[in-house]
Image: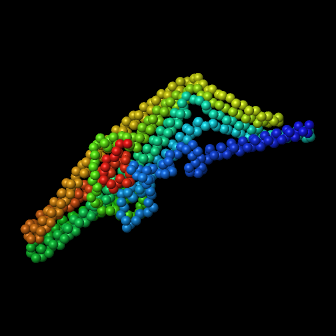
Amino acid sequence: MREKACVNGNFRHAELHLSLGLFCVAASVTVSSRGQEFAPSGSDPLRVDPQVLHQGVRLPGDSQAPGCTESLSRDQPLDLERAASFALCNSPKARATWEAIEVQAGVLGEAKAAYLPSVVSSLTVQRERNLFPGESALDDSKTGHSAYVNGSWRVFDFGGRAANRESAEHLLSAALATHDAKLQEILDAVIAAYFDAVTAKAELEASQRTRSLASDTFAATGRREGKGAASHNDTLQAQVALEKSLLAEKKAFGTYSRDLAVLGYTMGLTPNATFSLPSLENPPLGTIGELNQWLEVAEAQHPALVAAREEWAAMTRKVTATRSEGRPTLDFTANLFVNGYPNQGFQTTPTRQTTFGLTVTVPLFEGFARAYKVQEAVAQARGAEAQYKDREYQVLMVVVKAHADAVSALGNLDSSEALLSAGRAAEESSERRYASGATSILELLTSQSNLADAEQQRVQCLSEWYAARLRLWTSAGTLGLTRLKHPLIPPEVK
């Protein structure tokens, strides 16, 4: 009898250790699954995270991801590449689409996890106490425990898991492409703001030259009036021209200050950040190429269209997944019960039961809900196709306009340069003629006004070409930081 009790006690001791071990494993799995938000970055057991989450996104034509500049230098003028880097690093839109990539990576991980078995365990410790009023000698108490482990593994379905996984992969690709498209939008915005500011600076410099020329003319006219070589009316005309140039200079300074503030805000800088801009120079020319070539590149590579195609493919796979939910499934299950079953009362007799089985689940009738769910999924897939067609039309229309603007801006460069050269020659000739008394002050002031207009036209044409050549890249979704300063070369269709 003593030997039997000893053996029985050892068995219970082993059972207790086994149950506690299973409980600890289940607890650790539960904490791990519920504590993903506290998991260290890079925890990816199923390898679903795309490389861009660790290496960063490289823009088209770039060899590495954009770097973030720590600070601005007052001594070094801000070039477009650094301005674009600031905007890409500080834009909340880019951060929002970046987080969407991580979300879709998690969705893909969940879809892949459906192929793996799941294990659940529980441990219950109970204490039973019996009280007999008036018969305290009969009072007793007992302590016991029960453990439960369940494992299940889906062996077969009608393509539901595969469709969900493929849909998640397409949506992850769509999230990556959406992020790339957002970067192109940010580049387009910073390009517009940058060249608005550079143009405003160039117009301010031109207005300062015009004001300096008007001031010299007013002083020369005053000296000529003192010598009797010019009338007082000539002096008044020169003074009017000087006041007009002073007003134009103040307006140009106000426009430059506004555009500089807009550029700083577009770059995500603090309001008190100060920086300088370079002077507007002759840009690289290059070859624009045919419109059809740009349209083919945009249709094949524009990230917004890539995202729309991936979303369309994901919705198509969702139709298969929805249909499979209404079809049979086959699951393998295994259970271990120690000292009873879950949610049972206290059991004094030690028991241990193991079960294995295959479960076939056959949906018979869902009140026609499945048919409507499939109909809904099909409609969503058709809607995704329509959205892709609409987005394709919008993107290609932007390319058509950008190409026309680039062709027009390139053609205006030679004309604006010729106009500026003629204006300078006319102003120099009028100045010599007025100094020798061969012409009136009106001719001189007119030539100076024409020169000021020619300088503004040249500034506008240079700025329009700078912006148009880069906007053509962004309209096709293929602009990278290394292409900001290079001549315009049509990209190749990949």
Relative image position of residue 288 (x, y in whole percent): 28, 48
Tell me: residue 349, above or below residue 69. Answer: above
| Closer-to-camera residue (90/329) | 329
| Closer-to-camera residue (312/5) | 5
| Closer-to-camera residue (265/153) | 153
Q: Residue at x 39, y 50 (%)?
A: 61
Relative image position of residue 47 (x, y in whole percent): 55, 44
* Residue at the extreme top: 364
Report the quarter where the N terminus lies.
top right
Is residue 32 visible in the rendered image? The answer is: yes
Q: Is residue 452 left or right of residue 32?
A: left
Q: Quadrant of residue 209?
A: bottom left
Q: Is residue 302 left or right of residue 333?
A: left
Report the quarter where the C terminus lies.
top left
Count of labels in the image: 0
Q: Residue at x 54, y 30 (%)?
A: 159
Q: Residue at x 42, y 52 (%)?
A: 63
Is residue 247 visible in the rendered image? The answer is: no
Q: Residue at x 59, y 28 (%)?
A: 329
Q: Quadrant of residue 6?
A: top right
Q: Is residue 147 left or right of residue 217?
A: right
Relative image position of residue 25 (x, y in whole percent): 69, 44
Tell me: residue 225, above or below residue 121. Answer: below
Relative image position of residue 247 (x, y in whole percent): 24, 64
